[in-house]
């Protein structure tokens, strides 16, 4: 598991720190009851690519969040459990 503080710091360095949230502030973005370690809101294609690059490098699981309408239907990605 990726260390939460390291991932948070890396994401803050890649994005505006106002768009990176720690676990304590990410509860409303839970997927099937699993609260993310860190939640980021990239805006540009380049930011999305950077978030994905960092996540891959650090072994972090990414669950995309669109409108948030079907986030508790089951079949949670295994790596997120």
Image (cartoon, helix red, strand yellow):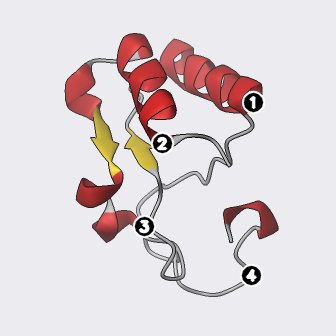
Which of the labelled discs sits on residue 8, or is there none? none
The residue tagged 3 is 68
- Residue 44 visible at all: no
The residue tagged 1 is 56
**Placement of the C terminus among the 4 image quadrants:** bottom right
Task: Please tell me which residue lies in front, 22 or 48.
Answer: 22
Q: CA distance from mark 2 to mark 4?
A: 24 Å
Q: Which residue is located at x 75 percent, y 30 percent?
A: 56
Disc number lying in front (2 or 3): 2
Which of the labelled discs sits on residue 75, or is there none? 4
Badge 3 density bin: few <14, some 14–19, many ≥20, Cα 10 Å: few
Q: Identify the image quadrant of residue 60.
A: top right
Disc number lying in front (4 or 3): 4
Residue 63 placed where, x, y %?
61, 54
Say whether disc 2 or disc 4 marks the residue closer to the N-terminus: 2
Q: Which residue is located at x 63 percent, y 47 percent?
A: 62
The residue tagged 2 is 4
Q: Secondary structure at mark 4?
A: loop
Question: Does residue 58 lie above or below 38 as drawn?
Answer: above
């Amino acid at each position: 598991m990726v260390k939460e503080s390291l991932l948070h710091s890396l994401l803050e360095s890649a994005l505006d720190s106002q768009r990176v949230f720690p676990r304590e502030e990410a509860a409303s973005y839970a997927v099937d009851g699993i609260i993310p370690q860190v939640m980021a809101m990239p805006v540009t294609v380049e930011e999305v690519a950077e978030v994905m690059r960092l996540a891959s490098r650090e072994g972090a699981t990414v669950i995309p969040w669109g409108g948030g309408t079907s986030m508790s239907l089951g079949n949670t990605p295994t790596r997120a459990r």
